[in-house]
Image: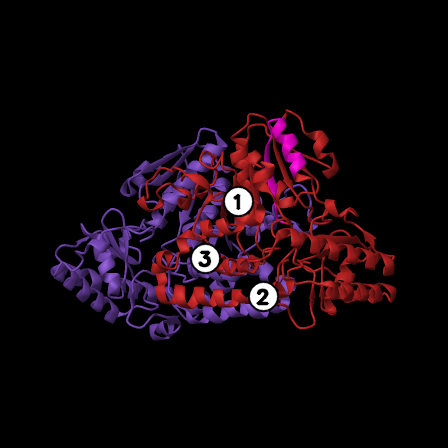
Chain colours: A purple, B red
């Protein structure tokens, strides 16, 4: 059994804070502080340019990819880390569209908007008559047909936590000759993912949510083994070149998933992520999932028993949820602010959703119970009803 | 007069090291250590998700752009920081191509290859018959004609330090209706740049060289005031959206240079860069240039007097050089390794170039003289001739 008291000891959580927003930004792994100090002082400071070799900076995108691969059920040497999720999605879609003559990209209205925006930008640039078709999440399966070239979905809805049946949709897609791209932003580190087993073609994700890599931590891209030596590249950066340090004037992609590298890697962020990933040593992802489901059920039951004004926005069936629980509430933004004022950190998504991320690595029953009690009191006594909590900040 | 003893005190340089590679990676500003610790401990650690507002993370790309703008002679609110130089070049080129019906992109063979690769990727994706034409650097001006749509150049050659006449080429280009994109990788922080005055349309650059932002520090993009509200976007990330936190499904670019934002910013790298930029307070860029030219002339004179086997690769005329001095030497790689072994850090570029970056912020006459003496001894006594210095590492 995974010892979650041990993983919890690996994080710094401020005194008195109950942190239920790891679905947006994971908390600080204590080891990350030393990793950042080492990257700055022993590496940048002492080795300077020679650290590219001596401290292994140049290999970080591949090394971190190899460390993330087992967490998402990927084969070795199929994952590369770097840039941002939006950019990795753009690369995956560029590669996928080059593999099919079909013009329809199917996605859903629950996808994170940036994925849709990047797709809109790419098909406009390609100008070859591609269409991005978005349907309701529950209508995706019925919308799969042989006109669809690429199925591009985020497994878990960022607002409600609603989870697609990735194995089933990937299988249906494959049967119809459709290339699949899965965005694992709310999956990686949240529950077991089985990329190799499901036969997904491409996947992308970020590392600052359930992987706790810190603000601005790099993204990752997965390219299935059968595609990695042939995948078309659209963002032809020098570090994705076959021979970057020979500096030829013509682009030739590297062999393997290395071709998905673009420019100079964000070394400091990567060294922090490397330390953050140490927390996964000894964690069984099935245990993590069981704990997440138990805590989620406890939160739902508690809120429904004591806070009748909140309405569950997440699926009631745990198998259809990721690792977050969301509720509708008319004054969700103000309620979120009132909770933050008490050190209970969830977040708000327009128009009326309050989200709570469930991360058993550092959250237990006591935190869930305290959150329930606080929400009950705040809603029963309308403590959220303050003018200063009705004005929205830039990020919430 | 700029007090360079004061700027030098702002850097950590290892005891006994003479660092002449700031053209590749600037050294550690002492304040960067505290900035990183603060970003991790007081911000990420204590504020967690609320730091996006409370610590101003969400505004970092714009704030840092506003701080870099005066260093490159740009108007206020024309610069945005983020991602990597290759990606910012891609965005600039995408915007530029949307402003012209002409099909020729003109560049030169001295451009950094990644810029050419990104352009090759973009025009392949656009598939509208664009051509990337590269000529010898000295042939650029003669190659400007009314078939050229975009002139895309790096001002300073990464190998030789040869510098284009940016004002003249920009003016000629403008007279011919050509959009200009300048890569300032080896210009920003190296000498005065006058973007507004020259009338450049777009510029891009990185912050880990002469701006000392650290390994993987973010890039920047400049969009001239007359374009910033209309520039076409090709990488449509959510943070470049007009209303990112309303999460609409259709992309609408933000007003101004904010539209060049893509995904979640690399917060830790940006806070480090913010601290690194403090060093520029009180630095007069004309003084910097004078000091750079004096040190460069001293290095050239010293090497030519005592190391006849090295042949100057940089222009002899200081007005045609950036802030680096390069030499040809048959065994440049081994010589570079022999110098590194003595704590004198320059770098090598294939096939036979030894580069020395001249950064008066932390280098003075004593360092130049010590480097000359070491090179003289190593070449006179063939001390570079060791087998272990003949095998090249991944990055050099």
Residue A49 visible to an observer of this rendering: yes
Q: Nearer the viewer, mark 2 or mark 3?
A: 2
Q: Distance between the residues labelled 2 and 3?
A: 22 Å
Q: Name the residue under label 1.
A: B221
Q: Distance between the residues labelled 1 and 2?
A: 27 Å
**Tag nearer the camera, 1 or 3:** 1
Q: Where residue A52 is drawn, which disc sits there?
A: none
Q: Where is residue B277 in the image (x, y as percent from the top left)?
A: 54, 57
Task: Give the image quarter of residue A248.
Answer: top right
Q: Residue at x 64, y 32 (%)?
A: B171
Do tags 1 and 2 sit on the same chain? yes
> Which chain does tag 2 point to?
B
Residue occupied by mark 2: B10
Q: Which quadrant of the figure contains the N terminus of chain B? A: bottom right
| In this view, A246 is above or below B45 | above
Instruction: Determine whether the residue tagged by mark 3 lies in a helix, strand or loop.
Output: helix
Q: Quadrant of the C terminus of chain B?
A: bottom right
Residue A378 lies, in percent from the top left, at: 16, 61
Left or right: A139 as drawn, with respect to B152: left
Q: What element carries label 1?
A: strand
As drawn, the residue found furthest toward the front would be B1
Q: Which of A188 and B122 is in front in this view?
A: B122
Query: Which residue is at the front of the view, A35 or A278?
Result: A35
Mark 3 packing: few (<14 Cα in 10 Å), some, or many (20+)?
Answer: many
Q: What stretch is highlighted in magenta?
A: B167-185
Q: Which chain carries label 3?
A: B
Say which label, 1 or 3, has the lower sequence index: 1
The residue where tag 3 is placed is: B267
Q: Do discs 1 and 3 share a chain?
A: yes
The image quadrant that residue A284 belongs to is: bottom left
């Amino acid at each position: 059994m995974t010892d979650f008291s041990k993983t919890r000891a690996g994080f710094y959580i401020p005194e008195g804070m109950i942190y239920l927003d790891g679905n947006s930004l994971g908390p600080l792994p204590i080891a990350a502080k030393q990793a950042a100090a080492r990257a700055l002082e022993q590496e940048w400071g002492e080795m300077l340019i020679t650290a590219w070799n001596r401290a292994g900076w140049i290999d970080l995108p591949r090394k971190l990819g190899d460390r993330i691969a087992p967490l998402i059920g990927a084969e070795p040497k199929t994952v590369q880390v770097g840039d941002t999720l939006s950019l990795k999605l753009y690369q995956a879609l560029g590669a996928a569209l080059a593999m099919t003559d079909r013009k329809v990209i199917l996605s859903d209205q629950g996808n994170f908007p940036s994925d849709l925006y990047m797709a809109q930008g790419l098909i406009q640039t390609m100008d070859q008559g591609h269409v991005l078709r978005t349907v309701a999440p529950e209508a995706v399966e019925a919308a799969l047909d042989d006109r669809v070239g690429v199925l591009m979905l985020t497994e878990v809805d960022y607002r409600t936590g609603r989870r697609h049946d990735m194995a089933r949709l990937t299988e249906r897609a494959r049967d119809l000759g459709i290339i699949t791209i899965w965005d694992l932003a709310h999956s990686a580190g949240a529950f077991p993912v089985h990329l190799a087993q499901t036969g997904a073609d491409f996947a992308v994700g970020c590392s600052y949510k359930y992987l706790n890599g810190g603000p601005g931590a790099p993204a990752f891209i997965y390219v299935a083994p059968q595609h990695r030596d042939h995948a078309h590249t659209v963002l032809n950066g020098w570090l994705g070149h076959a021979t970057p340090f020979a500096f030829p004037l013509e682009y030739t992609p590297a062999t393997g998933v290395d071709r998905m590298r673009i420019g100079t890697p964000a070394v400091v962020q990567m060294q922090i992520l490397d330390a953050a990933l140490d927390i996964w040593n000894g964690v069984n992802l099935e245990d993590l999932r069981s704990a997440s489901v138990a805590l989620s059920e406890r939160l739902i039951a508690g809120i429904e028993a004591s806070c009748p004004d909140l309405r569950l926005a997440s699926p009631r069936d745990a198998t259809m949820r990721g690792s977050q629980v969301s509720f509708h509430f008319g004054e969700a933004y103000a309620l979120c602010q009132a909770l933050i004022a008490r050190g209970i950190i969830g977040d708000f998504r327009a128009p009326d959703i309050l989200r709570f991320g469930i991360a058993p690595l550092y959250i237990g029953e006591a935190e869930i119970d305290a959150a329930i009690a606080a929400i009950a009191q705040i809603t029963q006594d309308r403590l959220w009803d303050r003018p200063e909590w009705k004005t929205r900040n830039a990020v919430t």
